[in-house]
């Protein structure tokens, strides 16, 4: 059996996208790990799967698998690629697309200039909803990592994020501390570790060590979490430009209870078929 797929990326965060509306396949972690290998497979940060919705008010179900085969709740860069994919494949003619995810429903809006805005829904700060082990909700927390105490923000954007402010991203030990934060015992489901350097009131730089993947060139939910953390702590003012290694995302957030709006590109790289 041949399975059609599309390789896409959002600011260098790359994906294999599969339509399981018109095709059928049984996925498993071994197969996903095999496909994700950049030397012997297709190579990607995440596998994105388009499925029929379970909720009749939704247009599609959106599922995300990390390179290690684990399924995760949300992926913002992937959501933009998802929108471009279902339009390109003529699975829908809508430019305002509602999809269900494991992290809750989201809305995808395709702009006239080809940029895609994702309504990521309101961020969550209650520790049990992230999940994060803390006695009560706070704007920042002390987190013991290796031989130091970090001041971090804990935010859920449908998936868990830990955001640390740093002075200089060029020298900060992201690759040493990222894995330690990702597997920290206070985050029972693991966490995406973001490291943010402030530029001015409306811009910041960000590197993200993603759960189950490693450092990626861009992370959409990470950019949302970083902007929200910076706004909540009084360092940033919406709208915020978040500069990632792969490019820049525009984030807007009006405050508690309001949705986070993320805008950026989605790019198709190539089409292919793989034999199952």
Image (cartoon, rainbow, N blue to C red):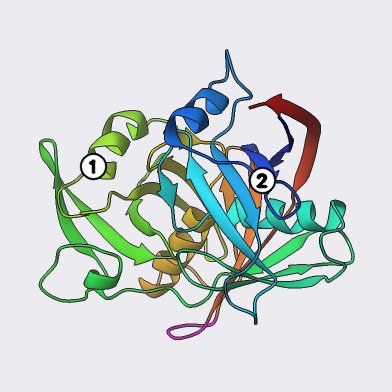
Task: Name the residue carrying label 1.
Answer: 183
10 to 74, vertically: above or below: above
Q: Residue furthest front?
A: 1
Instruction: Tell me residue 82's x, y (percent).
Output: 69, 54
Q: Is residue 276 left or right of residue 212?
A: right
Q: Which residues are magenta?
A: 254-258
Residue under the point 38% across and 38% down: 212
Instruction: Tell me residue 51's x, y (percent).
Output: 64, 58
185 to 124, vertically: above or below: above
Quadrant assignment for the N terminus: top right
**Does dot 1 land on a helix, a strand or a loop?**
loop
Residue under the point 42% across and 42% down: 210
Residue under the point 76% across and 28% down: 273
224 to 238, vertically: above or below: above
Residue 24: mark: 2
Instruction: Tell me residue 55's x, y (percent).
Output: 58, 77
What is the quadrant of residue 163 in the picture?
bottom left
What is the quadrant of residue 43 in the picture?
top right
Instruction: Tell me residue 78's x, y (percent).
Output: 62, 51
């Amino acid at each position: 059996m041949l399975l059609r797929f599309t390789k896409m990326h959002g600011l260098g965060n790359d994906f294999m996208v599969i339509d399981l509306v018109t095709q059928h396949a049984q996925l498993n972690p071994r197969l996903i790990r095999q496909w994700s290998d950049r030397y012997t497979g297709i190579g990607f940060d995440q596998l994105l799967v388009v499925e029929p919705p379970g909720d009749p008010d939704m247009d599609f179900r959106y599922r995300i698998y990390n390179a290690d085969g684990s399924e995760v709740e949300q992926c913002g860069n992937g959501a933009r690629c998802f929108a471009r994919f279902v339009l390109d494949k003529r699975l829908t003619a809508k430019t305002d697309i509602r999809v269900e995810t494991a992290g809750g429903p989201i809305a995808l809006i395709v702009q006239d200039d080809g940029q895609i805005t994702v309504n990521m829904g309101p961020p969550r700060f209650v520790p049990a909803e992230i999940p994060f082990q803390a006695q009560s909700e706070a704007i920042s927390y002390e987190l013991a990592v290796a031989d130091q105490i970090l001041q971090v923000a804990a935010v859920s954007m449908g998936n868990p994020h830990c955001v640390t402010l740093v002075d200089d991203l060029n020298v900060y030990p992201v690759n040493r501390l990222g894995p330690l934060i990702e597997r920290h015992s206070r985050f029972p489901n693991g966490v995406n570790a973001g490291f943010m350097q402030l530029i001015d009131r409306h811009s910041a730089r960000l590197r993200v060590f993603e759960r189950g993947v490693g450092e990626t060139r861009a992370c959409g939910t990470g950019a949302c979490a970083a902007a929200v953390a910076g706004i909540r702590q009084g360092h940033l003012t919406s709208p915020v430009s978040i500069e990632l290694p792969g490019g820049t995302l525009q984030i807007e957030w009006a405050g508690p209870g309001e949705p986070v709006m993320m805008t950026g590109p989605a790019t198709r790289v190539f089409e292919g078929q793989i034999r199952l």
